[in-house]
């Protein structure tokens, strides 16, 4: 099946942007060089469902250099960069996706990936794995393993495994330290603010900016917004997370209170219905609403649609909803991940680490997957540390090493006061 992309004519621009990303991803490029002769992924058919961005293109090229055959779809209807998809299609990489997919088209693209009968899967949000399990269960016998990129996907897979229904081993790449503590914090932090700015061009300084959820992504966003001069307000459901936010200097309150004073809202919870009609009803005229959690269920778009008397696209990725009393609320990127839909997603430097984890985890599964029981696994610790070590080297930084004496000290109990 040939690729299906929006406009093959965009390939030249896409190639240049991929080349730029490659120049910013030294860890993955080093791994590509190291594995392009031994080809540890020979014989592997990798089905991918992951945002089609420049960084993903660097990963796909690396998988191919290591011997894999790949077939790819995007994992969100609004995140595909059409020039990148065109560039990959021109390189004979099977790719199915374009920006602005309907739900039906979205699953059509995933089905095309399943057509290649993958024996490894790489997912972001678990829609590929769920489609395989729900409608092609017999095909899962051929799959030796998979990886999952994001928090929401790992949650869904753990729930499936908890019911005994997961049919092959999956490594939760999201939970690697060199992924979760960097990509979600610094990547989502910077790129979500970037998305809000591109869609609005508002000044962040002096604004009341409400962050829903103070986990990895929420903390990153709050810190970056604070740096730009926002008065950051955090909403949470976990007391320890709320306390951490308070001690970082942020005000913590329930969303119903924050709704009355917020100028800009961004959700990052992985939960649903964080902002609904009861919140819209008390918001200020001009409030800006956005989400960076995986699915478009955190800001209730259906509630907003019901309340609205009029709706128009006022800027790219910015829809104005006018409610009955005349207040105007602005929803960015249709409530989908604002950083990928209204900006370019995470900077390449941080995806370098996430995708190095993906690459090493897939090689691990190609070797070991057959002997692993179905379940959700962690990235092996030595791979996580390897990624950190190479990243530091590429940043020109070195570490101290414990002396034998220090090792004995930290592992022993003999020396006290
Ligand atoms: N936009 C992106 O590029 C991007 C990148 C990484 C992760 N994600 C997604 O972002 C979401 C969050 O990921 P994370 O790694 O920060 O997860 P996390 O588990 O570290 O943090 C989520 C936080 O939200 C809080 N929370 C849950 N329900 C809430 C509610 N109703 N109201 C307020 N707070 C609530 C939790 O207590 C937790 O502290 C997930 O959907 C993940 O898949 C998006």
Image (spheres, helix red, strand yellow):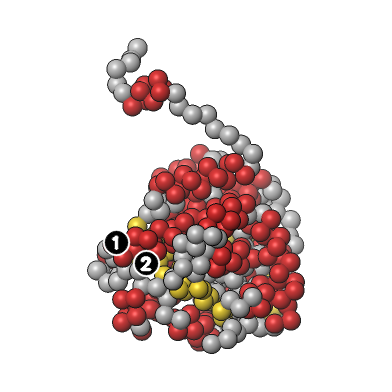
Quarter of the view holding residue 263: bottom right
Of the 4 image quadrants, the one containing the C terminus is: top left
Residue drawn 38% across the image and 75% down it: 130
Point 51% across, 67% down: residue: 67
Query: Is 182 or 307 nearer to us in this picture?
Result: 182
Where residue 241 sits in the image (x, y, percent)?
A: 44, 47
Instruction: Answer with the quarter of the image where residue 248 lies.
Output: top right
Q: Give whichever of discs 2 and 1 has the lower sequence position.
A: 2
Q: Is the residue indicated by label 1 positioned so its CB lies within 8 Å of ligand 1?
A: no
The residue that mark 1 highlights is 372
Q: Position of residue 375 (x, y in %)?
A: 30, 63
Task: Residue under label 2, please give it.
Answer: 145
**Residue that lies at the very extreme toward the left in this rendered image:** 164
Image height check: is 8 above or below 332?
below
Q: How many marks?
A: 2
> Quick check: can you spot residue 345?
yes
Residue at 33% across / 27% down in the picture?
411
Do the numbered discs 2 and 1 sit on residues whose CB atoms are within 8 Å? yes
Relative to residue 246, is residue 334 drawn left or right?
right
Badge 2: residue crowd in 10 Å (few <14, some 14–19, many ≥20): many
Tell me the SS state at disc 2.
strand
Decide: is 167 above or below 345: below
- How far across and how far down the image is residue 41, in percent? 46, 65
| Residue 235 visible at all | no
Q: Secondary structure at mark 1?
A: loop
Q: Residue furthest top?
A: 417
Q: Position of residue 37 (x, y in %)?
A: 54, 60
């Amino acid at each position: 099946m040939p690729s299906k992309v929006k406009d093959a004519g965009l390939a030249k621009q896409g190639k240049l942007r991929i080349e730029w990303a490659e120049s910013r991803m030294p860890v993955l490029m080093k791994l590509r060089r190291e594995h392009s002769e031994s080809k540890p992924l020979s014989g592997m058919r990798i089905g991918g469902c992951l945002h089609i961005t420049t960084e993903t293109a660097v990963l796909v090229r690396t998988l191919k250099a290591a011997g894999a055959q790949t077939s790819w779809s995007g994992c969100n209807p609004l995140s595909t960069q059409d020039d990148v998809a065109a560039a990959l299609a021109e390189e004979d990489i099977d790719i199915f996706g374009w920006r602005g997919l309907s739900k039906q088209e979205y699953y059509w693209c995933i089905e095309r990936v399943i057509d290649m009968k993958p024996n490894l899967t790489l997912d972001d949000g678990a829609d590929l794995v769920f489609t395989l399990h729900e409608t092609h269960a017999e095909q899962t016998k051929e799959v030796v393993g998979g990886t999952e990129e994001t928090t929401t996907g790992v949650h869904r897979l753990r729930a499936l495994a908890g019911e005994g229904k997961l049919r092959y081993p999956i490594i939760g790449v999201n939970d690697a330290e060199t992924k979760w503590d960097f990509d979600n914090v610094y990547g989502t932090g910077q790129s979500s603010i970037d998305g809000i700015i591109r869609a609005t061009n508002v000044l962040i300084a002096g604004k009341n900016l409400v962050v829903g959820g103070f986990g990895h992504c929420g903390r990153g966003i709050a810190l970056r917004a604070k740096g730009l001069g926002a008065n950051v307000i955090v909403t949470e459901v976990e007391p320890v997370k709320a306390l951490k936010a308070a001690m970082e200097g942020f005000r913590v309150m329930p969303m119903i209170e924050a709704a009355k004073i917020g100028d800009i809202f961004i959700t990052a919870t992985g939960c649903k219905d964080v902002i609904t009609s009861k919140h819209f009803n008390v918001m200020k005229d001009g409030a800006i609403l956005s989400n960076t959690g995986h699915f478009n269920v955190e800001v209730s778009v259906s509630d907003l649609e019901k309340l609205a008397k009029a709706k128009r696209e006022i800027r790219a990725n910015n829809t104005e909803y006018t409610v009955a009393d005349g207040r105007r609320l602005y929803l960015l990127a249709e409530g989908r991940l604002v950083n990928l839909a209204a900006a370019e997603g995470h900077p390449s430097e941080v995806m370098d680490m996430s995708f190095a984890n993906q690459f090493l985890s897939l090689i691990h599964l190609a070797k070991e997957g057959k002997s692993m029981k179905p379940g959700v696994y962690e990235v092996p610790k030595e791979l996580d540390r390897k990624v950190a070590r190479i990243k530091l080297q590429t940043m020109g930084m070195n570490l101290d090493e414990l002396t034998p004496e220090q090792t004995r000290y930290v592992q022993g109990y003999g020396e006290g006061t």
